Image (tube, rainbow, N blue to C red):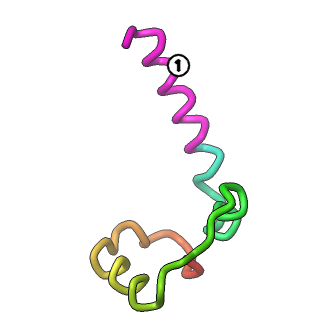
Amino acid sequence: MNVAKSRLLMRIFRKFADLIKDISVEECRTIFNTVNDFTEGEKATVRNEYPRAFENINKEA
């Protein structure tokens, strides 16, 4: 991949990240048309395995 394409991709990724970084989990699910199909047990397992990923977000995930 050439440098121009690489820079363009980085700008796109940065813009995308900026767009979704401050929205709630439910808003993100609405935007991407996804459903939460995790059981309560699966959610707890993920939260325990990756606690840093959940430090600054709401609990509706």
To which residue does mark 1 refer?
A: 8
Which sits in the foreground, 48 or 30? 30
| Residue at 60% in and 35% down | 15
| Residue at 39% in and 8% down | 2
Which sits in the foreground, 12 or 40? 40
The quadrant in which residue 45 appears is bottom left
Q: Split into 4 quadrants, where in the image is the N terminus?
A: top left
Q: Is residue 11 magenta?
A: yes
Q: Position of residue 16 (x, y in %)?
A: 59, 40
Magenta part of the protein: which range?
Answer: 1-17
Left or right of residue 32: residue 12 = left
Image mark count: 1
| Residue that lies at the very extreme toward the bottom in this rendered image | 41
Say few, some or many: other residues with alpha carbon within 10 Å of mark 1 (under 14 / 14 to 19 / 20 or more): few
**Disc 1 secondary structure class:** helix
- The residue type indicated by label 1 comes to Leu
Q: Split into 4 quadrants, where in the image is the C terminus?
A: bottom right
